[in-house]
Every structure is written in structure tokens, then in C-alpha cells.
Image (tube, helix red, strand yellow):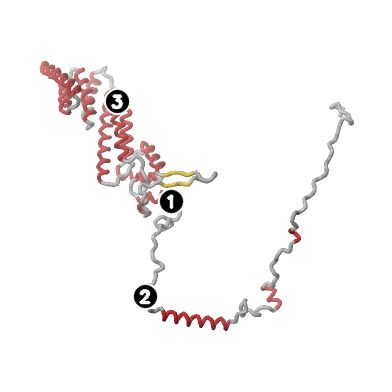
């Protein structure tokens, strides 16, 4: 206390109050007479007391065995008489209780106990797209290898993930539990397990109406790098897709051919633009590639662009014979009046120069 500077008079202890009382029970249930099971002798006690076999043949309610046998005999005779009286009723054939019932057994031998709908997709279809939707990437790659000879699957990773994610929806469940999975089918009206198949995003109709138009726009705007990427994506999409009719098969073949031609043409032009014309060999190669650029089977409007570029390059490098050939092809393809008028001027000039060189 001396250290803190206090005396005994300055220290005041707190006063203690009365302790809390234990509450009394409102209803004295402990005084009630609770019903208990009547005590009886166990089997061992009966054996020790010699009570085994006493009154065991008598019923619990005092019925005699002979009376029960008489009542059973009377009941059998009554049933026989009833059967004779209703013999005139034609009830038809007996009901077969083992008749097959139309229901889906999710644990049948076909589905397998504990298997999901995604497992059914992989078993029901030989198409790689359905295996991708089921999450069986290994079997999908094996199918692509056998069916189309694919060996490099890294470019297909984005398409694989797109198909896999689109075939399922997830509903959040209770916290701490996994979400509820809902499988999205393209055969929505099918109830047979063998015909259940998943939905595949970006079908052929979407590819033709959206992706192809995007590639054409890249060609018109001279964005060849974007065009090559777009048409490669189209090939990947068609490769991991499904068809349901011969018409769709032909449409898929047409889309593949179109994408192939545009990738080839754009790649040739990009290669030509990467060359420098500071040497005769590079200039020769540039003129050669510009001529190759006009060969792939493009749309007429896009082919005219390739021919115009090749004609101007040939004319600028005094290759008048090739320029005249490109001009003739452009006139044969036709087009707008303004374009054809410009081509005719080039054609006349090239023709005069060719005659002059001869």
C-alpha cells in the first residue's frame, strides 16, 4: 500500500448481496403416479418356478382351440358354396400380376446402379461431341483420332470446355453441400434411356449465321489475322458437333470446305505481306503468292478483292501479262459498275503495254 500511496482507511470492500434462491417447481410432476409396466416373470424365472407349459395352449382371449377349428371349417364350406353360386359370372382370364409396367428403372442393368445421366450419354452415342458433354474427354479424343485422324488436341481445348459447360446447369443447395446438377438434353421428348443425348452449343445453323458472317466481315475489312482465327474456330466447332440428317451432313461439309479455302487464301496473303521486296527473289516470291491468292474458291466479292490486289501488284512491277489475265478474270466474274469500269481501264492499259512489249 505504501508503494501505491494508499492507506487502510481509503480501501473500501464491495458489499455482497443475498445469494439467488433455487426456483420452486410450478407443477409438482415428481409427485404424480406415473404408469409403469406390470412386473412379470421372465422365461428363466418361469422355468425355475415350474410355470413353463401352463395354459400355453389356451388363447390370450380365452378362445378354445376346438372352437377355432370349427369356425375355420364353417368358413371353408361357405367359400366353396359362394364359388359355386358365382360360377355364371364370366370374369375373363386371370390377372397377371407380373405384367410389365411402363416405368424407368434408373438402377437397371443398362444404366447401372449409381450412374448419372452423363454416363448414359457416353454409352448412347458414338459421336465425340456427346462424349465431351459427358465429361469423357479421353474417349472423345480416341473417337476423333479414329474418325478424322486428329492427333493434336490442344486447339480443341476451348471447344471441349464450351460443350462440357453448356450441357449442365447447377442449382445451389444448402451451405456446405454440393449444388444440384441438372443435365440439359437435346432429346427433350425422349424417355427411353438409350435415346437420351446432351445439347451441343453452337450448332450448324449458328455457325452459318454468325461465325461465317464474322469471317466474311474480316475479309471485307482486310483484317486477315482475325479472319484466320475465326475460320479456324469454325473448323473446331464443326469438328466437335452433331448432325441429325443428310441435309445437315451436306451443310457441314460445305462449311468445312468454305473455312478451309478462306484459311488458305488469307494465310497466303499474310505470308506475302511478311516478305520484303528489297531483293529480286523476294519480289518474285511476292508476285507468285499474289497469284496464288486468287486461286482459292472464295465468294465472288472476296475473289474480286484478291484479283484486284494481284492485278495492281503485277502492274506496279511491270508484269503486264499477269495483270491482263487478272483483269480478264475480274470482268468475267462481274460486279458493280464502278468496279468493272476501273477494271476496263486497267485492261485497256495492260493490253496496250503487252502489245508494245511484243
Percent coordinates x, y for residue 54 in the rendering: 66, 80
Judge by depth and name the residue closer to the eye, 28 or 291.
Answer: 28
Residue drawn at (54%, 81%) of the image: 71
Label 1: state its secondary structure: loop
Mark 3 to mark 2: distance in Å?
85 Å
Q: Which residue is mark 1?
A: 116
- In this picture, residue 163 sits left or right of residue 25: left
Q: Is residue 320 visible?
A: no
Percent coordinates x, y for residue 281 in the rendering: 23, 21
Judge by depth and name the residue closer to the eye, 319 or 330.
Answer: 330
Mark nearer the viewer, 3 or 2: 2
User: Height in image: 24 above or below 165?
Assistant: below
User: Height in image: 242 above or below 209?
Assistant: below
The mark found on residue 90 in the picture is 2
The mark found on residue 221 in the picture is 3
* Quadrant housing the C terminus: top left
- Report if the CB atoms under discs 3 and 2 are less than 8 Å apart: no
- Give the quarter of the image for residue 99: bottom left
- Report if the CB atoms under discs 2 and 1 are less than 8 Å apart: no
Percent coordinates x, y for residue 310 in the rendering: 21, 23
Of the two numbered discs 2 and 1 on the same chain, state the one appearing first in sequence. 2
Residue drawn at (74%, 62%) of the image: 32
Amino acid at each position: 500500500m505504501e508503494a501505491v500511496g494508499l492507506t487502510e482507511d481509503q480501501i473500501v470492500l464491495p458489499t455482497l448481496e443475498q445469494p439467488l434462491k433455487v426456483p420452486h417447481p410450478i407443477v409438482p410432476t415428481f409427485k404424480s403416479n406415473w404408469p409403469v409396466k406390470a412386473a412379470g416373470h421372465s422365461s428363466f424365472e418361469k422355468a425355475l418356478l415350474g410355470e413353463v407349459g401352463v395354459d400355453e395352449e389356451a388363447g390370450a382371449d380365452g378362445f378354445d382351440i376346438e372352437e377355432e377349428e370349427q369356425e375355420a371349417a364353417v368358413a371353408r364350406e361357405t367359400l366353396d358354396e359362394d364359388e359355386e353360386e358365382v360360377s355364371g359370372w364370366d370374369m375373363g382370364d386371370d390377372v397377371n400380376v407380373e405384367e410389365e409396367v411402363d416405368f424407368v428403372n434408373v438402377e437397371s442393368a443398362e444404366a447401372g446402379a449409381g450412374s448419372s445421366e452423363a454416363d448414359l450419354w457416353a454409352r448412347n452415342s458414338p459421336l465425340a461431341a456427346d462424349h465431351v458433354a459427358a465429361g469423357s474427354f479421353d474417349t472423345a479424343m480416341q473417337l476423333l483420332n479414329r474418325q478424322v485422324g486428329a492427333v493434336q488436341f490442344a486447339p480443341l481445348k476451348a471447344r471441349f470446355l464450351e460443350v462440357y459447360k453448356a450441357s449442365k446447369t447447377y442449382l445451389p443447395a444448402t451451405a456446405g453441400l454440393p449444388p444440384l446438377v441438372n443435365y440439359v438434353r437435346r432429346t427433350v421428348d425422349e424417355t427411353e434411356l438409350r435415346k437420351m443425348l446432351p445439347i451441343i452449343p453452337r450448332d450448324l445453323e449458328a455457325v452459318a449465321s454468325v461465325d461465317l458472317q464474322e469471317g466474311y466481315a474480316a475479309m471485307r475489312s482486310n483484317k486477315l489475322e482475325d479472319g484466320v482465327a475465326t475460320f479456324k474456330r469454325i473448323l473446331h466447332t464443326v469438328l466437335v458437333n452433331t448432325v441429325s440428317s443428310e441435309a445437315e451432313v451436306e451443310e457441314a461439309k460445305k462449311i468445312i470446305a468454305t473455312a478451309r479455302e478462306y484459311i488458305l487464301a488469307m494465310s497466303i496473303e499474310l505470308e506475302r505481306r511478311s516478305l520484303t521486296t528489297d531483293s529480286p527473289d523476294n519480289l518474285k516470291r511476292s508476285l507468285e503468292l499474289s497469284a496464288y491468292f486468287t486461286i482459292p474458291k472464295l465468294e465472288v466479292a472476296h475473289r474480286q478483292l484478291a484479283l484486284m490486289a494481284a492485278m495492281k501488284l503485277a502492274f506496279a512491277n511491270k508484269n503486264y501479262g499477269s495483270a491482263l489475265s487478272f483483269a480478264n478474270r475480274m470482268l468475267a466474274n462481274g460486279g458493280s459498275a464502278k468496279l468493272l469500269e476501273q477494271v476496263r481501264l486497267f485492261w485497256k492499259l495492260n493490253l496496250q503495254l503487252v502489245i508494245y512489249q511484243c
